[in-house]
Amino acid sequence: MRPASLLRTTTFRLALSYLGIFTVSAVALLALVSWSTTMFIEWQVQETVEAEATGLSEVYRDRDLAGLADIISQRTRQDIDSRATYMLMGSDGLVVAGNLRAWPTEVADLLGWVRFRVVPIGGIGPGVDVLAHAYELAEGYRLLVGRSLADAKRVKSAINRALGWGLALTILLGVVGGYFTSRHLLQRVEEMGRTARRIFGGDMSQRMMLSGSDDEFDSLAESFNEMMDELERLLEGIRTVSDNIAHDLRTPLNRLRSRIDLVLLGPPDCDGYRRTLEETLAEADDLLATFNAILTISHAESAARLDQMEPVDPSRLAEDVVELYEPLAEEKDIRLTCRADPGLTVRGERHLLFQAMANLVDNAVKYTPSGGVVTVSVSAAHGSAGIAVEVADSGPGIPEEARESVLERFVRLDSTRTTPGNGLGLSLVQAVARMHGAGLTLADNHPGLRVRLEFPAGL
């Protein structure tokens, strides 16, 4: 990627924003360090001045003004670097001793701690800042004791230079680091974009690559891949449904057309017309039932009824389903029983749950031979706080290798082709289970099939 394009990226701008915040914080911190260092040095200068003033005051007590003047002259001669400032001035304004030409005009008649700028006799150089203490002595004499702040100024300048270079280096490293960080992140974003464009181009097998760092990009890629897996499954389901609809509905539609053609080609017969209309109506009802089942499955898979979720008593639903299918079971001489624990509640869509249970019981009664047993049970799931709904029969069952495929739409086993149905019953149950976050398990009942719906705790 060209640097100019990279500089316009959000990641680089974000890096510059953080760099700006860091720079402002660093400048404030460095200013505090510089000020603290300057104050510390000046405090040391004050301590030195006070120590010298204390020594001179002792000399003044012991040897009077003449002795004080001698000591000041001696110290002035010993101060080769002219770091110290001394001045003893008489009441007439003349300098008695010291290394200043005159009393500083900035100080005037001030006493205590003073700061001024002078050019000492010793020649320290132009414009030297001095921190001094002025004292009032007997007979109008005044004493000034100070120290040059040149060393403090040099130290402060050195610190400021070091801090300035450090800040400049920090900014440079921040810009360079932001550039390369943005480049690295942008490479991952571009890779994701290329994958998305390939998917948009029709290659649904493409997936986002994971770096293995478990960062936000990996989390985003995992979520995207999961979405693509589900989308691919749904698209495959749509293609399968389209093929199955074309295959399974073509036969009844052909029968309808052939039946009508035969009636129209034959001699007028009111009774024949009536029988044909009744058979056509039955075929149309079967087609409508198939389309209704497809729509129900679509609604369940799209979670279109999530807003209709409410507390539902699965035991009551099971009892209603059993009561509905009892006449059909009696006609086939099948014993249909219900064992339901009271006081159980799941959160779900009542109509879809009832339809799922009805489909399971309908299949069980339909495929169980005369004299068999169908049992519906609702209970708290073993070892958890969830709720399990089971429908068990004594029919032929489903081979283990076919249990996954029978959950797909329009899939029917060869042994059940002669039995009325559209192959959507278990598909609807699976869609309802997925919508409610429930697990669907098909197992042997020895003999027969045991279907278990297990709703998680806290649903």
Image (spheres, rainbow, N blue to C red):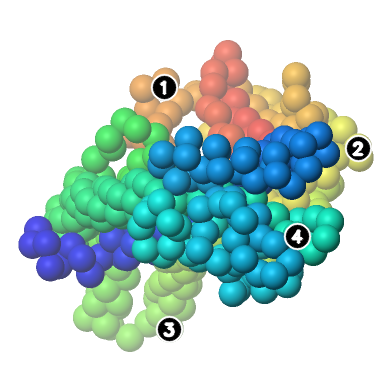
- Name the one closer to the observer, 169 or 214: 169
Q: Is residue 163 above or below residue 112?
A: above
Residue visible at 87% across and 33% down in the picture: 341
Disc 4 marks a residue whose amino acid type is Tyr
First in residue order: circle 3 vs circle 1: 3
- Viewer-nearest of labels 3 and 1? 1
- Name the one closer to the observer, 22 or 451: 22
- Viewer-nearest of labels 3 and 4? 4
Residue visible at 43% across and 29% down in the picture: 403
Image quarter hosting the C terminus: top right
Per the model, the C-alpha gap separating discs 3 and 4 is 147 Å
Residue corresponding to mark 2? 342
For label 2, the crowd category at 10 Å Cα-Cα, with few meaning under 14, some 14 to 19 and many 20 or more, is few
First in residue order: circle 2 vs circle 4: 4
Residue corresponding to mark 1? 399
User: Can residue 48 be seen at all in this image of the molecule?
Assistant: no
User: What is the x, y in percent for residue 246?
Assistant: 25, 61
